Image: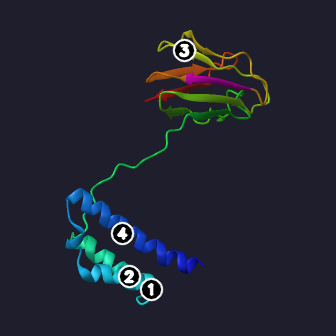
Amino acid sequence: MKHVSMKILIPAIVFSILLISSSTNFVSAESIPEWVKNNALWYGQGNISETEFLNMIKFLLESEVIKLESVEKIVPEVRDATVIIPNGNFDVSSSAFYMPLNLEISAGTTVTWTNDDSVPHTVQSQDEYGNVIALFNSAPLNTGDKFEYTFEEAEVYNYFCSFHPWRVGVVTVK
């Protein structure tokens, strides 16, 4: 079944490439060489090998019969993100920093801090001088507790734990 589905999938991909190429370069279907159409048909019928078929596609790309313009990668927007307060985060000599230390997100994303440490922590927003500000501030989070905040504006947000002020983190909203 896998072999049959590949025989259908690859000609469909080639047809899609040709269609995209045709629409972006204003090439008509009549300008597609007959041998290309035949190769797609023959591959679909199992008369030529996958290697022969892929060589045809390679030829079309190298000879610029098919021109692929750079296409922006479409990435689904993530609207939820997590910061972990790892076990050992309370210890000043520990390397258990927030994970991630600098979270980069899009505006409108809700960030959830989760305390995986064995002691309570807080999440306190700070200004650029290290002063606590009333933007996002959690109550003490016991082990397993969570705190959420939705970031609406592009900016760099600093935060720290009021119990363990050497533990600082950053949320960068783009």
Residue bearing mark 1 = 45
Q: Earlier in the sequence, mark 1 or mark 3?
A: 1
Residue bearing mark 3 = 126
Residue bearing mark 2 = 41
Q: Earlier in the sequence, mark 2 or mark 3?
A: 2
Whether the residues at callouts 1 and 4 have beta carbons within 8 Å, the answer is no
Vertical arrangement, residue 47 with respect to residue 87, above or below:
below
In this picture, residue 26 sits left or right of residue 110: left
Type of the residue with mark 3: Gln
Residue at image point 74% right, 35% down: 87
Magenta-span inclusion, residue 147: yes
Region of the chain picked out in magenta, as a range: 146-150
Quadrant in which residue 27 is drawn: bottom left
Whether the residues at callouts 3 and 4 have beta carbons within 8 Å, the answer is no
Circle 3 residues within 10 Å: few <14, some 14–19, many ≥20: many
Residue bearing mark 4 = 15
- Which is more foreground, mark 3 or mark 4? 4
